[in-house]
Image: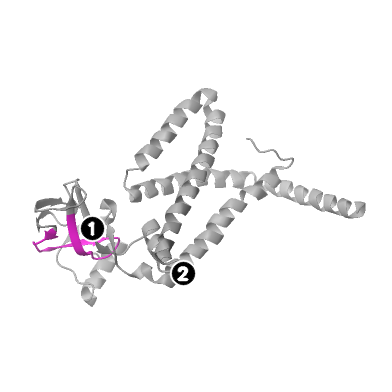
Amino acid sequence: ASARADEPVSEGMVSILEPFIDTIVICTLTGLVILSSGVWSEKHENEFSRTDMVIVEGSFDESKEADREVLYHYFNNTGQESVEKYTGTILVENGRAISNGYTLLHARSIAENVRFIVAGEDPYSGSLRVENGQLRKEDITIIGESLMHSAVLTSVAFGKGYFGDMGEYIVPISLLLFAFSTAIAWSYYGDRAVVYLFGQRGVMPYRIIYVAGFFVASFADTTLVWTLSYVAIVLMTLPNLFGIMLLRREMKDTVKAYWQDFDAEKAKTKETK
């Protein structure tokens, strides 16, 4: 809507550069860092996300082959899972659970050295009600050792590299820059789409909803935020793919004409020299 280009293909060539750098280059390098560091298969201390955490009945031990087999079926929903979500009470003393008969799972792994914290830093003592695998008390923070994923895993991986502990700051700085640029770009894309669908009168309500979404996401569970973003990306991708299929012949002709003009201009420039 705001691009100044004689040919739509030239604008498209510029537009594909950003996802190429983000997806092919940056994501590949990040994946190599995670794999080479080995942290993807190690447990590290972290604050547990409620959406990644579930409490199940029974005491499981990852060192036992039978327990690993049972948990494999549970995590992968193979239809052979026999694990039941725990409902009951957990007794906690000075931040540590003293009752048995359950296992706390986080990020597809058995959590270890679990601590229950209240008010940000004070060890919790008392009873915690669990229903269908989830804690009912919302103001409790759970910290322990487990597998990790997403930005936390990436930060730890970079911390194992050449830059040492300073490497952990690469991810938050990169995320800040990436999030800022993405927020501006996607806001504008949505702005233009709203103008096309509803006219100029729809821009202000759209901007209010967009900014409100950022506010909610700032304190919402990150797993939930990422899940919603994945759904939104799919909803955005499907109509685009459908449009590409419908306009494939026009696109092919446009690209062909663009390269013909490009080659002709290039040849003309050589003759001039």
Q: Position of residue 99 (x, y in %)?
A: 8, 61
Quadrant occupied by the N terminus: top right
Quadrant occupied by the C terminus: bottom right
Q: Residue at x 28, y 53 (%)?
A: 49
Res 79 visible = no
Q: Residue at x 49, y 48 (%)?
A: 177
Q: Position of residue 190 (x, y in %)?
A: 51, 36
Disc on the earlier residue, 2 or 1:
1
In this picture, is 198 found above or below 145?
above
Mark 2 element type: loop
Mark 1 element type: strand
Dividing the picture into quadrants, the one containing residue 214 is top left
Q: Which dot, 2 or 1, sits closer to the camera?
A: 2
Magenta span covers which residues?
A: 96-116
In this picture, is 185 found above or below 53?
above
- Read off the residue under disc 2: 162
- Read off the residue under disc 1: 143
Question: What whole-number distance in Å separates the C-alpha atoms at marks 2 and 1?
Answer: 28 Å
Q: Residue at x 28, y 59 (%)?
A: 46
Q: Amino acid at mark 2?
A: Tyr
Q: Position of residue 131 (x, y in %)?
A: 15, 50
Instruction: Count how many numbered circles sit on residues in the image.
Output: 2
Residue 104 is one of the magenta-drawn residues: yes
- Of residues 270 and 239, the one nearer the viewer is 270
